[in-house]
Amino acid sequence: MRTWPSILSTLLPALVLIGCQRETAFPPPPQATPKPYFARVMLDMTPGIPPPFGAAILAGVEPPAPGLNWRWLSSPASFSFELEDRVDWQLDIHLVVVDKVQQQLGHQRLIVNLNGKTLITQTLDKSGPVVLTLPAQPGPKPTLELQIEPCLPEPHSPPYCVLIQKVGWLRELKGEYK
Amino acid sequence: MTVLRILLGVSFVTIFCTAAGEFLLRALQLQLEPTGRRFAHFTLGAVLVSTFVFLLCATHQFRAALILPAGALTIAAWVRTCKPTFRPNFNLHLPPLWQALFWLPWTIFGLAYLIAAMAPETSPDGTGYHLGLVYRYYEHHGFYTLTTNMFAGLYQGLEMLFLAAFAIGKHSAAALVHLVFLLLAPFGILAIAKRMDEPKAGVLAAMLFYLSPVVAKDGTSAYIDTGTAVILLAAFFFLQTWATNPSLKTLIPAALLTGFAVACKLTAASFVLYAVFAVLTATLPWRARLRQTLQLLAFSSLPLLPWLVKDYLQFQNPFFPVLNRFFPNPFMYQLVEDEMRRIMAHVSDVPWSRLPWEATTGGQLAGILGPIFLALPLGLLALHRRSTRQALCASAFILLTYPSSIGTRFLIPALPFLALALSIAITRIPAIGTTLATLALTAHALLSWPPWLEKWSGHYQWRIDTLEWRSALRLTPETEFMRIHWPDYQRGLLLDQFVAPGERVFSPNMGQMAYQRRELIGTSDSALGRHVFLTYLMPFSPQLGNTWTRDFHFSATTTRAVRLTATTAPLDSDMRISEVRFYDGDHEIPRQPGWRLTASANPWDAPLAFDNLASSWWTSGDHTKPGMWLGVDFGEPTRLDRIVLHQQTDQRWMSIQPAFPSGDQWKLHPARYTPLETPRRASLRMETHHELWRLGIRWILMPDSQYGAPDVRDHAAEWGVAQVGMANDFRLWKLLPPE
């Protein structure tokens, strides 16, 4: 019976002392390197990443698959966006040219149409990732169309053209805060 | 089926507790009188069952498959050994009038309470942390470290009983366990009063307590105040037993219940002082009194010690979330604790002179006791009676902690004793005592009847506001009831639908934890929550978004360490520093791995002032005081003549000076500085996004009415967020991964 008070009276001050002796000095953390920051209105094909406000796939993109950050793109594929009314947006397109398609069909051609006008035409002659960042004047509600020629016919789905990872708009956040 | 599970859950816990309690009393060879017997068995058993569930939780073994057989075996052994009778006994050994005054309101209000408690649980704290934590312990099979919610550090003695019921009947079963305490309270009060030779006062006091609107609301919700009151009553009951037969075996139940009351609600700690007072002032030799006091403290620590240890291991503070000044930790800023205490001590800014009115009738303190309690001073008329002095003495000790939290429900633990003192005074008035008591009880019952409360008391009070028997019996589906009565329900469902387990959600406005399983970060629930909140405010608050630079120049000094010391008068705000840079001439001294960064308060955040990120910052987490500092030990003599500090503009009123070691002391070094304010950077929204991401936030849940929410909505691309859902005006934003 008499042991409990002694245990208690020993334990509580011990806890206090241990609390006082905890490590409270630290080395400098990893140093962040200065980098530009971008606002993005981007359709990301990675499952779980929601589309930004007003952005939508209108046509030409196959359904997503779990664990994959790309989806098959057929031609023509079209997308719509809503952007803040600012002028310094850039178009950003992340594609992957597929080796198997290139081997069977040879070079492919990408045509980017913005609001019905051709923005750029580019030859895709190497398999692997392709990132296009294009200055553009999109307007507040741009519609984007990607045409790929030729594409690989598939018996049970639209022809496979390239893989798409991301498509959308970005703007470097610099200058004055608005 | 749902109703059966609910009833099974509460019945299981009730009988388990009763069986365990009777076993302990048999082991102690204590015989009790009939009126208080079941009350004593249940409350004493609650201590044992709660501690048992604690041990299961601590070892991550809490499972229905374990608690059910354990309870069933105990109950079976109890039936076999103790041969309990289940035949109801309505004879209280009182005159017929007093029997009627007891049973009539007990039954009528009891039925109303049953309907209220069985309806889906929607009470604020019940659906916040009481059942929110119970739900999480149930899912995790026990305790887990949840350092982002201060309520996880509160002792949860009663919640352990809720958990046992929850495992079978979910939320309403837990609320019904609390109802059992409420239903038993009158028997406890009556038993105590009978021992004081005040049986009539016992009936009146029992009903004054039982019918009180705030007690009714609390006792029919998954709260803990009424339960704590009943545990205190039981402790008092056993202290009475001990007083007539002072021995260890009579002291043990009183001690266990006293400790358990603290394990249920920290504010009951003052009752320990009463128990010590009662033992020390007993008519015993002083050596015996001293010995029994130590025994009392030892046994009362048994139900409490596990909670102290748990809190120490999880939060580095055995009394978390209070006393953080004595047990500093990274999980709670002192500033937030002080704010919490200020809010609790000044509910609705009601001055002390208005407390009696608001607590009994007005309702500004969240709930009312009932106007009859305005007559409490009458209790002093019977001060010459020992029974009155005992009751008032116990209530005085319990109320010692009341100034720290002045909400009406914090009066509940003392209420039975106050009611007893008042009732003794009323029933002892010669000739008209019985009439007065009958009138008082009738008036109290009529004024407290839940459907009539709204007719005379203010709206928007904390009271039983719906008695829907169809919902109680689940004839109205639970989801339908929730949809109508409680907007937070559907907001919470968004989280389970979209948020992955383990991802943190910053929500300044919603505390619903009981019907969703994700980790909510509020603005005042933790150090992280406050840090996240201030970070979130930066883009739209110039006070936090603009940069205040102090460029200190001083005579070149070679030193091993430096402290940036506040020399200002005490301030309400915390001390914050975003970046610190040291220079020798024109050259910035590169940060070295050998440096040691620390601070006089909240040293855990000190590295954030040295990470080259303007959007992260060290905060003292405490009110700025003269002498408060952020420091660096260079590890070797280092020459410097300039220090540049970046802070948020709200820090501009503060005076800061560098200090260098000089012998055993630190000396402030004269330095002149040039202040410079720079406006918010265009990238601040995205920087804030990155900082929130670094702090572990993946989602934001808030309505457009939240300060800053329109900015997030209108500049979603700059914030790096996308809306994934909306429910009852709340948008759920997902933070997109930083590129």
Image (spheres, rainbow, N blue to C red):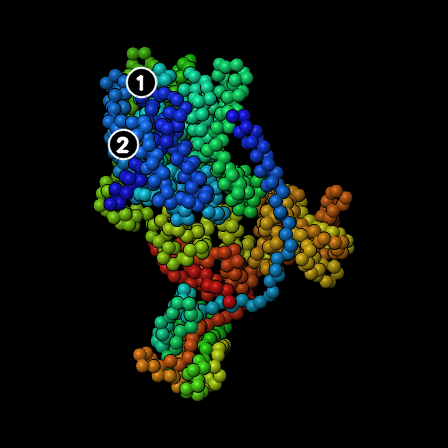
Residue B200's disc is 1
Q: Tell me if residue B558 comes above or below residue B390 in the rendering.
A: below
Residue B23's disc is none
Q: Is residue A6 visible?
A: yes
Q: Chain of mark 1?
A: B
Which residue sits at x=61%, y=38%? Answer: A17
Residue B110's disc is 2
Left or right: residue B422 versus residue A39 is left
**Depth check, front residue: B123 or B291:** B291
Q: Mark 2 vs mark 1: same chain?
A: yes
Q: Quadrant of residue B578?
A: bottom right
Q: Which amino acid, mark 2?
A: Gly
Query: Which residue is outermost to the top?
Result: B430
Measured as percent of width and height from the top left, residue B317 is found at 54, 40
Q: Chain of mark 2?
A: B
Measured as percent of width and height from the top left, residue B98 is found at 26, 19
**Depth check, front residue: A102 or B537:** A102
Q: Tell me if residue A48 comes above or below residue B491 in the rendering.
A: below
Which residue sits at x=25%, y=23%? Answer: B90
Q: Label 2: few (<14), some or many (≥20) within 10 Å?
A: many
Under circle 2, the secondary element is helix
